[in-house]
Amino acid sequence: MGVYHAGSRAVQDLLGVRDRADHVGRLLGQGIKPVAAAFLEIQPLLVVGAADPGTGRVWASPITGAPGFVRATGPRQMSVAGGPPPADPLATALTAPGAPVATIALDPRTRRRMRLNGRLRPTARGFAVAADQVFANCPRYIQRRESYERVPDRVPGPPRSVAELDGSHVRFIAAADTFFLATVHADGADVSHRGGNPGFVRVVSPQELSWPDYSGNAMFRTLGNLRADPRAGLLLLDWTTGTTLQLTGEAHTEFTAGGERTVRFVLTRAVETPAALPLRWSAPEYSPANPAPTR
């Protein structure tokens, strides 16, 4: 598998950044280096992205555990103890051997993130991922949260699945400073981070969201995937209460003559789970790179 497929190349060429993308692409590897393995072992949260094999819908789901629940178990393998609850929309996908799966570990304490994409192998304790691509991203747009605590008596509420966003969802999204975006392509899957000051994600209608695509590393993996396959899954979470909002649908990118980009997402289904995560993080220190949201 090459570093970039035709979708990413098309976006790079449209914006004139192919040379820069080639330079950055040299950082992608298949091996899990010791520094990456050490990073994984201290994380309490992993976000996983994939397509449900039954419906074809793309979802992003959170998995939590005591540090060490995610670890490198070989030079090209990451193992995860546990998985999402049975009611999670990705639960079935994470039992399919060989399925393309994407992961991202993001540490708000250090504003570091690591992505590992590959093929799924179910295990007795959870699942493993045979790595096709392993890489880190810069800390841009990551909000710093200095600490977290586990809330052992927090009990998740029943998931609520809807086809349209209501007022509570609008308020949830308006307060968000972070979300995770899962996409797919013919060769695999990818899950990325998006961050900004609250308000950077807009609810256009009960079935449509939009957000600006801020400047990044010029790889355009996410926008390239969407150009080839519009299916997408979003995960938003409340870093204090642990409530999650998972959205699945289709997205496309609008480009302006000045090179600015806006992504528009049309909802198919939303799943809200109160108190889904047993983690409570400290208040954010917003990234100095965050642009002011435009109205």
Image (cartoon, helix red, strand yellow):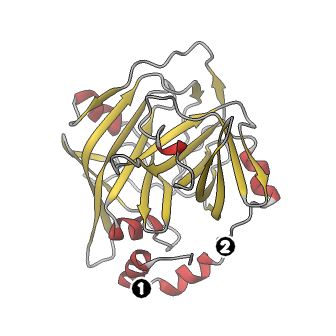
Q: Tags 2 and 1 in contact by the CB under 8 Å rule? A: no
Q: Badge 2 is on which residue? A: 27
Q: Amino acid at mark 2?
A: Leu
Where residue 260 appears, as percent x and y from the top left, is: 33, 70
The answer to whether 38 is drawn above or below residue 31 in the figure is: above
Q: Amino acid at mark 1?
A: Gly
Where residue 15 appears, as percent x and y from the top left, is: 38, 81
The answer to whether 149 is drawn above or below residue 248 in the figure is: above
Rendered residue at 22%/29% (across/down): 167
Residue in front for this viewpoint, 139 or 125: 125
Q: Quadrant of residue 146?
A: top right
Identify the disc placed on residue 16. 1
Residue in front for this viewpoint, 235 or 117: 117
Compared across the picture, whether 221 is left or right of 43 comes to: left
Identify the disc placed on residue 73. none
The answer to whether one can see residue 97 in this image is yes
Rendered residue at 60%/61% (across/down): 137
Q: CA distance from mark 2 to mark 1?
A: 20 Å
In terms of sequence position, does the residue under pointer 2 or pointer 1 come before the other? 1
Compared across the picture, whether 113 is left or right of 94 comes to: right
